Image (cartoon, helix red, strand yellow):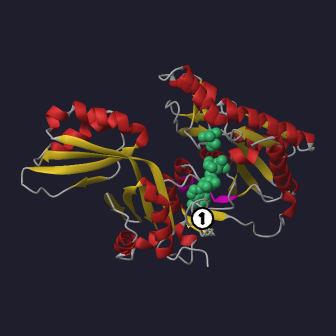
Amino acid sequence: MARLVMKFGGTSVADIDRIRNVARHVKREVDAGHEVAVVVSAMSGTTNQLVAWCREASRLHDAREYDAVVATGEQVTAGLLAIVLQDMGVNARSWQGWQLPVLTSSAHGGARILDINGAELIKRFKERDREVAVIAGFQGVYKETNRLTTLGRGGSDTSAVAVAAAIGAQRCDIYTDVDGVYTTDPRVVPQARRLDKIAYEEMLELASLGAKVMQVRSVELGMVHNVRIFVRSSFEKPEDIDPHAEPSGTLICDEGEIVEQQVVTGIAFSKDEAQISIRRVSDKPGVAAAIFGPLADSNINVDMIVQNVSADGSTTDLTFTVPSADYERARITIEKAKASIGYERLDTATDVAKVSVIGIGMRSHAGVAAQAFGALAKNKINIRAITTSEIKFSVLIDAVQTDLAVRTLHSLYGLDKT
Ligand code: ADP
Ligand code: ASP
Ligand code: MG
């Protein structure tokens, strides 16, 4: 007997038929003798609709009320799955975030989980013949005000990993619409290969650089609490799964568990980028502080930064990127600070994309990025900015060339399916 968390994303619970399919997966694990907590997302499209309604109601809506609205999607699925499970003869009860409770920070719309009380769930596994807990993902409660909070888009992954840590689950299965983590998004590159295992650190980079298969914070939590996260497909028929065989999917685990480490593990991309170039800014001490200070004060995350070598000794060009959602605010902030920074003009671009190459092997292999620059040049892909760190590098390019760049790098590093 094991204790398991099973998380099902939006497409996996898109309608009652799909919820029945999910219930059969749950029943399969219960019948195998396991204690099961299920975490569900809202039915696909629901959260988008709820967010759109908030925006339509008021562009500047109260974040607490936004949470009151968007948290409802998960409540519906949790209740429906509990009903379907009961109908199949499985003992089940739904839980909303405040009922466990899932305690979070006060950052409405993007709250962090602080603590989950798993005691009641464990008690019920023991006393109520392994009652299945069906938990609404994505939501929690801020204790001081007793108000509902949500965890940011894709946050049900984080709910699942946090529940797994709270109840000491042997595994946290993330059931989704792909059968694992691939070398890149399989919808963009059909030659992408499924990885048997990926290290937390690499998954963290992939997720934060654009691969939305797991929310970044869920991977962070998994790494801190050592939760074994297994990404697999909910589309596999429950009846076809051999309970004694190794399931197919991708295990996110410690680096030490991966025997055959490749130099490059995967490629991520993000089109939610915007570039701001400040032309002819004075080349003197204090300028970077004059630029990035006000941006930090406005809570804008600056990502890539490139400063050109000064041609005339007195002025230079400085380029940086921000998430598209922050572009307008960033531009206005820099325009407002023009007098204290001192520059000639701003050039901006919103049709840019960031493509990133990730692999722990880069720590010990030189020249990995250099290969990419050659291959991109051969395909006439212009690089606007570059950043590198220990286990990844990113290039900023024109958004229209994203797919070509991803495919080029994917084959360059031998990631294509053979
Ligand atoms: P869910 O609704 O189950 O949470 P998501 O849509 O959030 O599912 O995440 C699954 C999607 O992530 C896949 O459909 C796939 O297109 C995308 N994806 C992006 N990068 C990758 C990758 N490297 N491996 C697998 N899937 C990826
Ligand atoms: N329903 C939420 C969203 O769409 C949370 C999730 O699916 O993980 O972002
Ligand atoms: Mg998701």
Q: Mark 1 points at which residue?
A: 182
- Tell me where residue 231 sits by quadrant: bottom right
Quarter holding the C terminus?
Answer: bottom right
Would residue 42 appear left or right of 327 to someone viewing this image?
Answer: right
Q: How crowded is mark 1: few (under 14 residues within 10 Å), some or many (20 or more)?
A: many
Q: What residue type is labelled 1?
A: Tyr
**What is the magenta range?**
222-232
Q: Which residue is drawn at 85% across and 46% down?
A: 20
The one nearer the camera, 14 or 146, is 14
Question: What percent of the width, then of the height, locates residue 342?
Answer: 13, 38
Up the image or down, 215 lies above or below 391; here it is above
Q: Residue at x 62, y 26 (%)?
A: 69
Would residue 368 appear left or right of 9 to someone viewing this image?
Answer: left
Query: Disc 1, ligand 1: is the CB inside 8 Å?
Result: yes
Question: What percent of the width, then of the height, locates residue 207?
Answer: 52, 54
Q: Does the magenta stretch include residue 226?
A: yes
Q: Is residue 374 magenta?
A: no
